[in-house]
Image (spheres, grey):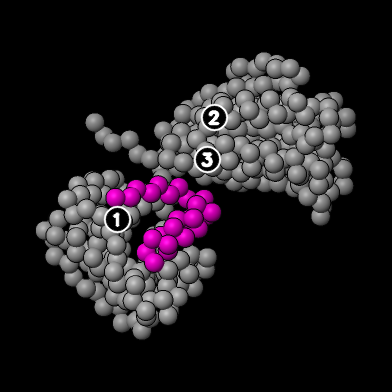
Amino acid sequence: MAKQFYIHTDVFAAQTSKRPGQPCGDQWGVHRDRQATTIVLSDGLGSGIKAHIAATMCVARIKAMLEAGSSLRETFNALTRTMDKAWGTSEPFAVFTVARILNNGQTTVLSYEMPPPIFINRVSVQLLNKHVYTRNKAIITESVCSIGKDEGLLIMSDGITQAGIGRLFPLGWESDGVKRFLQAKLPLKKLDVEMLAIDVHAQARAYWPAATGDDCTVVAMVNRRGIIVNWLSGPPINKVDDENWVKAFLNTPGIHVVSGGTTANLVSRITGNPLQVIDTYSAITPPAYELPDIEMVTEGVVTLNQVFNLLDEDPDAYPENSPVSDLAWQLRMADRINLWQGMAENKGESFIAFKQQGLMSRSKVLTAISERLRQMGKLVVCQNC
């Protein structure tokens, strides 16, 4: 049976505040873990700073609970209880939608007083509102679907669905109006949800009279086949783990990258393949290596520190014929990075010359790179041995 590939969820947003120059009362965020991508959209009561604070707090709390290991429903129920208590008081109040898309495409969307989500692919559009009920004063919407490759989902604040209310439409544009707007653009050769989000947002904004209306946000997501990079750096603490560690790394689907001379020699020994040095003729970057069946092999600490320094730079400005540029590009291209970090001590890192140059140790620089990649929207899964 063929192995099931990794599905990656791209997320885009189109957003404007009620009045230009004011903080937006809608906020959104993304949390990725090895099981799923979770997207949150929150709409604070009113507009301006107070609404912005309420929505920001809501998104931050949801992400924090998920990062701490709470389930989707535990998180959703905790937030709904908080908002139920804040309803009608001076406490920060926000409504919200949480969409959780598993890596196999199975999706659950939970909404608290928000417009229903919209499923879309290249030929059809569907409102998802299969289970609607009230809890205290609030309307809760629960939706379940499967989002395959090249299929997507749109969630939005009520600034979109209420656009034109009392002026062009008795009750506003409404979710059905958004659905018809999207349906008119189908069929498509390729599902570009970023452009669709921009188009829906622009149309809603046009329905509001100038300098009036509400904060408007559309968050769109689309599934595609993800790019996986398996990255091995450092040997295990215990030599008895060497063979299993390397074989597990090599047997994981995706692109394979090895960083560190000691690590490269370890892979060479386990696989029986010869390790060759590739001289890049650079005065500042150490040479790279070549190993059969491994897409990229680089030096360790110096290269990793230089990669960290390049990640925030424009790839078009990267030096040519450089293993640092090649590794930085691979990491930027990847959707999921499986970092296999061996925890054996690297005695070379204690050399005074390393400290003199301000180089971070392998452990520290890998942690710094991982955090930067997460900020860039990548899923980084770390395994230590």
Residue under circle 2?
72
Pointer 3 or 2: first along the chain: 3
Are the two marked residues, 2 and 1, in contact with CB atoms closer than 8 angstroms?
no
Q: Position of residue 313 (x, y in %)?
A: 52, 68
Badge 3 amino acid: Glu
Position of residue 113 in the picture relative to residue 323 (left or right):
right
**Residue count near mark 1 (Cα–Cα under 10 Å), binned few <14, some 14–19, many ≥20:** many
Q: CA distance from mark 2 to mark 1?
A: 32 Å
Quarter location, residue 299: bottom left
Badge 1 amino acid: Gly
Question: What quarter of the picture does the N terminus occupy?
Answer: top left
Q: Position of residue 100 (x, y in %)?
A: 53, 33
Residue under circle 3?
67
| Highlighted range, magenta | 361-385
83 or 8: nearer the viewer? 83
Residue in the picture at 75% in, 44% down? 53
User: Which type of secondary structure does the marked residue at label 2 adopt?
Assistant: helix
Pointer 2 or 1: first along the chain: 2
